[in-house]
Image: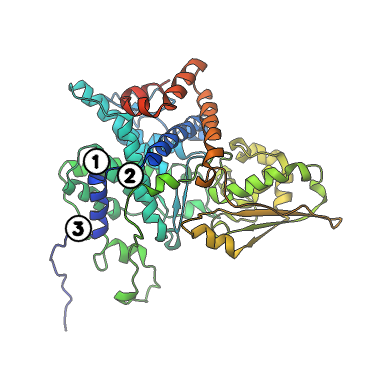
Amino acid sequence: MSINVDQNARPDYDEILQRIADYVLTYEIDSQDAWDTARNCLIDTLGCGLLALRFPECTKHLGPLVEGTTVPHGARVPGTSFRLDPVKAAWDIGCIIRWLDYNDTWLAAEWGHPSDNLGGILAVADHLSQKRVAEGKDPLTVRDVLEGMIMAHEIQGVLALENSFNRVGLDHVVLVKVASTAVTAKLMGASREQLLSALSHAWADGQSLRTYRHAPNAGSRKSWAAGDATSRAVRLADIAMRGEMGIPGVLTAPQWGFYDVLFNKTNKDQKLKPEDKRRFSLPQDFGSYVMEHVLFKISFPAEFHAQTAAEAAVLLHPEVKDRLHEIDRIVLTTHESAIRIISKQGKLANAADRDHCLQYMTAVPLIFGNLVAEQYEDSFHEANPIIDEIREKMEVIEDERYTQEYLESDKRSIANAIQVFFKDGTSTDKVVVEYPIGHRRRRTDGIPLLEEKFRNNLATRFPAQRCEQIFDLCGNQKILEETPVHDFVGMFVI
């Protein structure tokens, strides 16, 4: 009888980890488009966080774990008076950023919201900048934050291009954790070995399931999951900086590695041949592509696959608003990812369920001419039964061209179309929107609206004079980049 014995030959770090580490430590960002977009991304992301502070279900999560805790050089949470350790500050910042589903988006084989990484980046940078000044050293600047954002966007986005974590039931926040780990470790001054160690621990963690994003379990965890991930990244980076050894074969180790345990789903008794096992695919080198092409949510706080549907519904609103009870059916033409992720029938249990329902996000602007965060709340839904009546009349179908162009690198469209048919046999035109206002193809039209969104979000938290000071600073790329991080964050303190 033979006994299998593990061969204890410690490998080199997996190639993917080495490519991420070398990118973060050596790449020089020379794309002005990336720097400009990162600035717009920074203000939009912070604005989304400020707006979320209006919602008690969000703010109940914020603050120190032990009331009254004092943290020297503590990281601040924008829009609040909290001064926290960087791990909890990352959690809080990440939570408010994501709460309303209003920050940027990246759509590929995997989707996600790369600005979620700002939670860890800003918390670490604010803390370290204060600490450096106290030690008589130069502070970190906002340019360091923007660089971290560009790199985190790139790591998360390139890993998402051809690697679908949702198809094996994992949530996209695994990529937030990995990207945040890399860039926060760099901010902390990690060596290559320390950075590789931190990355290996990010992959070794048990990863989040997607069940809290889908029927019948959709709920508010999806609004703080990214904050949890970027916070965990800060903790892992800190562990590595203390000299903790890494796990070199964390991805590729037979039987025990990430690929075999989590990325190759099989039936219990089924075994895959080595040649059939999936590994991560990186179709391009890391650079600044993702930040340059990121999608902004400008008009609607809604899951991105529905952005163009909501836009089309707003266009149809004047034509249907007085004929809602005459509607026979509504044909909603979309792409495969939207059907798989957010198409839902039946009762919607909570606000988080509604902002991930394609039919709900289409019905509301069709009826009311707009879609805002308050319209997901229970009170609004209960007061307007017409929403569910309209939802029940929707037929969702796939257009294969929409699906194909969603994945094409030179298009990355997110197309939706709506046509309303009435009981008397008449119908509206089919209204098609293939690229949302936040798409790179519509930057000229989108950026002024993005700036207006930021100004409006500032006004929910600060007096007019402070709003103008922040807005003016954020409009000047050069001066903003040179601003010490702790001074910048200080402008957002209540």
Q: CA distance from mark 3 to mark 2?
A: 21 Å
Q: Nearer the viewer, residue 256 or 188?
A: 188
Label 3 crowd (10 A; few <14 / some 14-19 / many >=20): some
Tell me the quarter of the image containing the C terminus. Answer: top left
- Tell me if I can see residue 295 in this picture: yes
The numbered mark at residue 151 is 2
Residue 13: mark in rendering: 3
The answer to which of marks 1 and 2 sits earlier in the sequence is 2
Query: SS at mark 1?
Result: helix
First in residue order: circle 3 vs circle 1: 3
> Which residue reaches farthest left?
9
Q: Which residue is mark 1?
A: 186
Give above or below for 193 relative to 396.
above
The amino acid type, in three-letter code, at marker 1 is: Lys
**Picture coordinates of residue 43, whole percent (x, y):** 45, 32
Q: Is residue 30 above or below residue 280?
A: above
In percent of width and height, residue 18 lies at: 23, 54
Query: Which of the two discs, 1 and 2, sits closer to the camera?
Result: 2
**Distance from the alpha carbon under mark 3 to that under mark 1:** 18 Å
Instruction: Label 3: state its secondary structure.
Output: loop
| Badge 1: residue crowd in 10 Å (few <14, some 14–19, many ≥20) | some
| Residue type at the position of mark 3 | Tyr
Q: Residue at x 33, y 34 (%)?
A: 145
Q: Is disc 2 placed on a helix, strand or loop?
A: helix
